[in-house]
Amino acid sequence: MTTSFQPQSDGSDKKEELIMHEGEPEQTEDRSNVSSSMRDMAARIPEQLSAIGRDISRTIERAISAKDDYMLAVKVSQDAQHKLGQLVQAGVFGTRAEAAAFLIDEGIKTQGPLFERVEQKLAEIERLRAELRGMVGEKKD
């Protein structure tokens, strides 16, 4: 009794390979297009790496030159983000961060009386703390 095994075909006998073997001629236009695309992508890699390097250098230069500036991560609404983006798109600011910094500074200026009142209250709180510390110090003696 002899049993032979024959693989069943699912109708997909025709498979295209992207791997070309040595000495094998390019048989299809698709392979030629893929090869051309791969060469184009490979040729652009040095240019892209150079651009990344320039971006990193600019970022470092800005960070070094911004001695008096502080980074602050804030969450903003979708509408605020959109408005900041519009200021950048219009060319008013270079980045959304610059636009946000400007608006924060302007908001603080506009709310001057509020910040004066906050400053007074903080001075009063510090005075009360000092008074309490003095009372505790008297009882220790």
Image: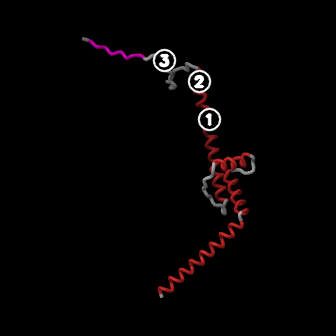
**Most distant residue in the top direction:** 1
Q: Name the residue at 60% across, 74% down.
A: 125
Tell me if 141 is positioned left or right of 84 in this view.
left
Circle 3 SS class: loop
Tell me, what colour scheme is on the image?
A: secondary structure
* Comes first in the chain, label 1 or label 3: 3
**Residue at position x 62%, y 32% in the image:** 40
Q: Is residue 123 left or right of residue 110?
A: left
Cβ atoms under marks 3 and 2 closer than 8 Å: no
Q: Is residue 70 above or below residue 37?
A: below
Q: Which residue is mark 1?
A: 43
User: Which mark is nearer the camera, 1 or 3?
Assistant: 3
Instruction: Tell us which disc is closer to us: 3 or 2.
Output: 3
Residue indicated by mark 2: 32
Is 109 drawn above or below residue 57 in the view shown? below
Residue 88 in the magenta stretch? The answer is: no
Q: Which mark is residue 14?
A: 3
Range shown magenta = 2-9
User: Along the line of sight, which residue is nearer the eye, 28 or 74?
Assistant: 74
- The CA distance from mark 1 to mark 3 is 32 Å
